[in-house]
Image: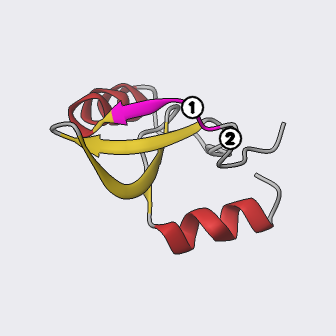
């Protein structure tokens, strides 16, 4: 299912992303479609970015718009 900002009800803290990235790397860093993203927060403040909940990669607003345009 394509992700849209209206569906993105989840938030993720940057410290959680570090753990997600570590586990992803330990699994061999397989390709990721970045289909499960959330708003990225640091110490309770929105960074303006989104992040993949599968691999931990962060996306700027422009990168997020490009993913949405691709239907991801």
Viewer-nearest residue: 41 or 52: 41
Is there CB contact under 8 Å for labels 2 and 1?
Answer: no
Residue with the most extreme bottom position: 62
Viewer-nearest residue: 60 or 48: 48
For mark 1, give the secondary structure: loop
Comparing labels 2 and 1, the label whose residue is closer to the camera: 1
Q: Marks 2 and 1, how far apart in space?
A: 14 Å
- Magenta segment, prevailing SS (helix, strand or loop): loop
The stretch drawn in magenta includes residue 10: yes
- Which of the 4 quarters of the picture holds residue 17? top left
Residue 35's mark?
A: 2
What residue do we see at 45% from left, 44% from top?
39
Residue annotated with mark 1: 9
Viewer-nearest residue: 13 or 18: 13
- Which of the 4 quarters of the picture holds residue 9? top right
What residue do we see at 47% from left, 38% from top?
55
What residue do we see at 62% from left, 43% from top?
32
Relative height, residue 50 to residue 22 (above, below) = below
The stretch drawn in magenta includes residue 37: no
What residue do we see at 21% from left, 33% from top?
15
Q: Residues within 10 Å of mark 2 (few under 14, many from 20)?
A: some
- Which quarter of the figure is the N terminus placed in? top right
Q: Residues within 10 Å of mark 1 (few under 14, many from 20)?
A: few
Residue 66: x %, y % from top left: 67, 70
Viewer-nearest residue: 26 or 43: 43
Counting residues from the start of the chain, the first of labels 2 and 1 encountered is 1
Q: How is the image coloured?
A: secondary structure
The magenta stretch spans which residues?
8-12
Residue with the most extreme left position: 43
Relative height, residue 48 to residue 50 (above, below) = below
């Amino acid at each position: 299912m394509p992700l849209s900002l209206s569906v993105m009800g989840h938030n993720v803290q940057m410290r959680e992303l570090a753990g997600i990235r570590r586990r992803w790397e330990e699994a061999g860093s397989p390709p990721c479609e970045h289909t499960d993203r959330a708003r990225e927060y640091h110490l309770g403040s929105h960074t303006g970015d989104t992040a993949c909940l599968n691999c931990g990669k962060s996306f700027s607003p422009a990168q997020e718009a490009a993913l949405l345009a691709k239907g991801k």
